[in-house]
């Protein structure tokens, strides 16, 4: 039984795992950045479309809420 080759294999396996974890963390960070950017674009689009709708409606629409049923 060769102990040195077993130790080398264990060290290589540990290094591979550590490298894989670093890659996973980097990719996760990039994906989260992309999702944040997409979310910001969606919010901006909602604000722009709501302003356009408000400008297109007559002045009396949307001012009062009918609470009598």
Image (cartoon, rainbow, N blue to C red):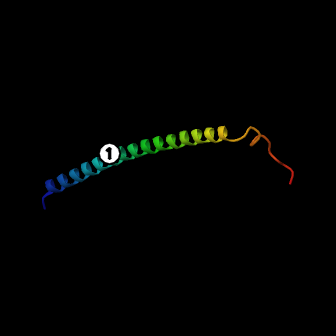
Picture quadrant of residue 59: top right
Q: Residue at x 18, y 56 (%)?
A: 6
Residue in view at x 52 percent, y 44 percent: 42
Q: Mark 1 points at which residue?
A: 22
Question: For this view, does 25 lie left or right of residue 61?
Answer: left
- 66 left or right of 40? right
Residue 20 vs 43, above or below: the answer is below
* Image quadrant where residue 43 sits: top right
Q: Find residue 67 and report its horizontal and vertical position in percent.
A: 84, 48
Q: In terms of depth relative to the viewer, which is nearer, 62 or 10? A: 62
Camera-side residue of 38 and 53: 53
Query: Which residue is found at the position 39% from the left and 47% from the top?
Result: 28
Image quarter in which the N terminus is found: bottom left
Report how many numbered discs are placed on residues in the image. 1
- Crowdedness of circle 1 by 10 Å Cα count: few (<14), some, many (20+)? few
Picture quarter containing residue 51? top right
């Amino acid at each position: 039984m060769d102990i040195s080759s077993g130790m080398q294999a264990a060290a290589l396996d540990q290094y591979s795992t550590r490298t894989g974890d670093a890659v996973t963390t980097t990719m996760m960070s990039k994906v989260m950045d992309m999702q944040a950017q997409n979310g910001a674009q969606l919010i901006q689009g909602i604000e722009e479309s709501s302003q356009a709708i408000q400008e297109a409606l007559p002045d009396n629409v949307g001012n009062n809420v009918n609470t009598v049923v």
